[in-house]
Amino acid sequence: MTDYSTIDFTPILEASADEVITESFVRDVALPSGGTLALITLDNGRDHTRPNTLGPRTLDAFGKVLDEQKERAARGEIQGVAVTGKPFIFAAGADLSKVSTLATKENARLMAQLGHFVLGKLGKLGVPSFAFVNGLALGGAMEIALNSDYRTLDSSAAALAFPEVFLGIIPGWGGATIVPNLIGIEKAIEVVVSNPLKNNRLLKPAQAFELGLFDQMFGPASFLEQSILWADGVIAGKTKVDRPNVPGKLERLTKWPAAIKIARDTLRARIGTAAKSPYVALDLLSAAKDNDRERGFEREDDALAELISGDQFAASIYAFDLVQKRAKRPAGAPDKALAKPVNKVGVIGAGLMASQFALLFARKLRVPVLITDLDQARVDKGLEYIRGEIDKMQEKGRLSADDANQVKALVSGTTDKSLYADCDWVIEAVFEELSVKQAVFAEIEPIISETAVLATNTSSLSVEEIGANLAHPERLVGFHFFNPVAVMPLIEVVKTPSTDDETLSTAMVTARRLGKSAVITADRPGFVVNRLLAKVMGEAARALDEGTPLPVVERALAPIGLPMGPFELIDLVGWKVAAHVQDTMVAAFPERFYASENLHKLAEIESPLVKSKIGKVEDLSKAAKKALKLGSTAVTEEEILRRVEDELAGEIKIMLDEDVVHAAEDIDLCLILGAGWPFQAGGATPYLDRVGASERVFGATFHDPLIGGVR
């Protein structure tokens, strides 16, 4: 077994000279029953603007403080040790800015071992150890709690999670070993693997407590005082700790292997096999059945050494930085102070998309929202949908009864467009045809105030052409949502040559208020996401037209790790919508985009695909096969993948040359947020650099050739 105390951690300590250290401050607390509790508070001195993080030097300092408490315990000076955080924040886990610089396998292993060495001391103090989790606790912070003997939780804690698999690694400071042996294998799979893959789903405090990750939960008003009283009871032997979710022999023998197999099969079906970390995490959870912490920690060391030093982690950190930093400071955004107030919203249309808009605006902005349509029956149907969705949110606890009633009251509908007169923001969601959109705005512009913003949700039409007949084209902006509106985090904000800074600023601020990330794009066909998806869909259609079996086409892009195959994506987007986008791109760039008559034929068939029980595409339906004219020169999966890679590399290079966006990072951000491009691929451009497509197509790379092709 590894003796962590004999390892020289100097290399990673020296590499972290600029680390913002989270200090471990100790104060003694007199316990009501007698004796003393040493209370360690983690605090990086950065108020609430920067959470506590756990870099190598922070861990080293924490370890030295724990050594001191062990010595004090041996002398009888203290009867317990507890760890808590600064107000509202326990810790945000490992310092990713430091972990991501550990490019060598040796340094990566040292980081894993240092975490095990230091956190392992919490169970070897000679007195009981407690974690009083008073706020945000992610990754390594949760592992501080797990390595403690006992754990309490503040019921108002902002976020609790093990996000590691989402970032291309695994919970490697005890999480993959301790969690399944604390709460059972099925719950551990949910927490460690499933939640991170669901856009990094967080645990609410009540959920974490019910799962058994914590022993007791208290309200925020007197959390620390109650935790100390509870700890005193445990130390004095008056309080017994019950952990009903700890697995027994029967679960280990029967349920454990079955749960792992089901999870592995589900992963393969849903995300393919390109992502490494989910499968490594499953391997660790499976092996944890032996309930041997020392062996489990060694397995975590091995896993982290491989994953941290690999391409996927570097790519994930690049993607994470885009989402966490660039998305919050959008390139090219005007001063927020220029934004106009939005106190009433108008939505032109009452169909499904329009109704989703109305609901989102009312729920997030809490301002009156007016929908209109050609007749009252359509308006009433839209209102019925909106109210039904609000009821569902209330049933799921996402809205209180008061909030639900307020949001319902904010949405109204009519056929009288004159009521748009006092709207500050009017967005259209009508049929995707240029003349229709032009006619709608021609009718609305004389009604609305001169300061109101006009927005179009077009997915591929020219925003400038939509506004060609406006008296004030400077107040028109593209505001392209992705479906489903409530879920997809991206909005493409399209700036025309006429769009003024006030309008653009209003659009960017409104997007943020809606809880979305916005990327500014030039007014070019397809903008970013649909232009590049049209490349993918076009190559899929080309291969099918040539005679390649659909299952082969569907599997071809698996090495990228996309969440679904090209035809599953087309089916989700809608066949007619996909065909329309393809037509738009072919009309704009006939020499670069592929036109397929078969795509239009499939759009006319009610059920063109055969799907599995979980919605995965298996083949064309009999009706589809009968309707299509296919060639006899099938191509391989490898050829399809190479075509897609090269076409994407070429098109992205052209888009950057055309200044569609400010930089390659914006294209990657759009694909991550709007098309589900996987984190472990790091966005399209670093992936295309790594596989050589950039060099093949234009003889250079999108990024400086540093870690994993990412600068």
Image: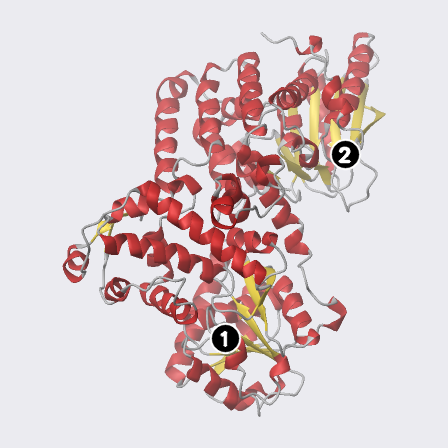
- List x then y, in percent, for residue 298: 56, 15
What amino acid type is highlighted by mark number 1? Ser
| 10 Å crowding of disc 2: few (<14), some (14-19), many (20+) | few
- List x then y, in percent, for residue 640: 34, 47
Q: Residue furthest front?
A: 699
SS of the residue at dot 1? loop
SS of the residue at dot 2? helix
- Can the viewer see residue 279 in this picture? yes
Q: Is residue 520 above or below residue 540?
A: below
Residue at position x 56%, y 39% in the image:
315
- List x then y, in percent, for residue 573: 38, 61
Residue at position x 66%, y 31% in the image:
99
- Quadrant containing the N terminus is top right
- List x then y, in percent, for residue 109: 62, 20
Residue 218, labelled with which disc? none
The residue that label 1 is drawn on is 462
Residue at position x 51%, y 89% in the image:
442
Model colouring: secondary structure
Residue 225, labelled with which disc? 2
Q: Is residue 498 above or below residue 600?
A: below
Residue at position x 62%, y 73% in the image:
367
